[in-house]
Structure formats: structure tokens, C-alpha cells
Image (cartoon, helix red, strand yellow):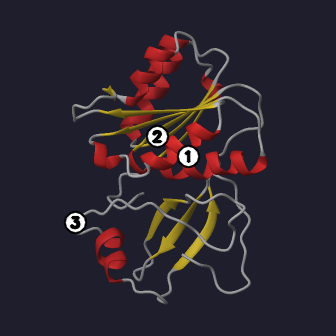
Amino acid sequence: MRFPAGVRVKFRAGQYLEVILGDASRRAFSMANPPQQSDGALLHVRILPGGAFSDTVLGALKTGDALDVELPFGDFHLRESRKPAILLAGGTGFAPMKAIVEDVLRRGVERDIALYWGARRRSGLYAEALAQKWASQRPSFRFVPVLSEESWEGRSGLVHRAVMEDFPSLSGHEVYACGAPGMVEAARRELVAERGLPSDAFYCDPFAESGDSS
């Protein structure tokens, strides 16, 4: 989406916007573009049959059509810290992670970052090549894709369990999680209880279960 000519909006990488539908209901979507791209918004939308936005509205949009949006919302963003950061994404929870990583790259922030991206099937890793590109360009960035329902040559299982396999202790880390509420809550509970992650070092943006959340 492009904002009206001359309009630029300040936001933090990781925040979201709300689309206002014709019946005044709202749908929230994380912005996948970094703040440096402030003249519009890139959304990652999972298409759901019969979804009020993802199917009905989005399916009918044409170039030049207008949407009512409000932004920014949320407090999900990378904190200023030197601690290693683990980005934990499920499905289209990759969207705010994309914004965060691209913001870090553009600002030249020196920090160890690992992105764990979980999906049911390989097709769910819809921007896998982009994440692999980041990893090839920056030694301090690591990308770990994880599939839960499809056999492949990579990591399998629950995405937060892959983090637990790789990190015996998370006492000196920060974790940023975005995805389905069940995934986020399981990650919070187990990483804190079993890997020593400080409870105040877990930041999250669970997607509401409205059927149309990104």
C-alpha cells in the first residue's frame, strides 16, 4: 500500500496498522517494511476462505483503490541492547521480523541476531530466500527455518523447541516472538522455565484469533 502523495508516517520496526472495513470493524496487520520506507506499508496476509478482509476485501482490490488505515500501534520492537536477540516467528509472524531485520541492516546495528521461522510446510516459508540472503551477507545474523508437518532436509518440530535445542541457557538473551497465541505462550512458558530466560526479556505480539489477523 502507498500512502497519499506527500504523506510519510513515523513508526518503529515491528509495529502494526489497522485496516478499517466498511462496517467499521478493524483488522490488524504487522508492517513488514522498515521505518526507512515510510511512504507506505507492506503487509503479509494469509488468505482465509471467507475472511472479511483477506478474502472478501483483498480479493476485490484493484490498483488505485483506497483503504482506510490507522497507524502505528503496538509496543513490539527491538529494544536498544547489546544482548543477543532471538526472533521467533510463526507463519506470517515473519512480517514484523522482516521489518526489524531490515531496520537493523539499514542502521548498521552490530548485534547477534538469530531468526527462527516456523511453518507447517515448506510453502509457508514464503520469503525463505530473503532470510537466507540476510544470513549470507551478515555473519552476526543466523537463520533457522523449522517445519512442523512436512519432512525435509532441515529442522523439524515446534519452532520454539528448536531454540531450546540450540541454547542450553538463555539467561543473557532477549527473545522476540510473533505468531499464533498458542505458539507465543508455549515459547514464553518453556523458555523462561526451562532455559532461564528472564521473564522481562520476552517480548511478543501474538496474533488475535479473529480469523483475519496477519
- Dot 1, crowdedness within 10 Å: few (<14), some or many (≥20)? many
Q: Amino acid at mark 2?
A: Ala
Q: Is residue 76 visible?
A: no
Q: Amino acid at mark 3?
A: Pro
Residue sitting at x 26%, y 42%: 121
CA separation in Å, label 1 and label 3: 26 Å
Q: In x, y percent, where is residue 68?
A: 53, 80
- Residue 17 vs residue 138, the one in the foreground: 138
Q: Is residue 118 above or below residue 35?
A: above
Mark 3 and mark 2 lie on one chain; the one further toward the N terminus is 3
Mark 1 and mark 2 lie on one chain; the one further toward the N terminus is 2
Q: Is residue 43 visible?
A: yes
Q: Is residue 66 above or below residue 204?
A: below
Q: In x, y percent, where is residue 151?
A: 22, 31
Residue sitting at x 70%, y 60%: 35
Residue sitting at x 45%, y 78%: 24
Q: In x, y percent, where is residue 134?
A: 58, 43
* Residue located beneath label 1 in the image: 97
From the viewer's perspective, tell me whether residue 85 is left or right of residue 183. Answer: right
CA separation in Å, label 3 and label 2: 23 Å
Mark 1–mark 2 contact, CB under 8 Å? yes
Quarter of the picture holding the C terminus: bottom left
Foreground tag (3 vs 2): 2
Quadrant of the image occupied by residue 60: bottom left
Q: Amino acid at mark 1?
A: Met
Foreground tag (1 vs 3): 1
Q: Secondary structure at mark 2?
A: strand
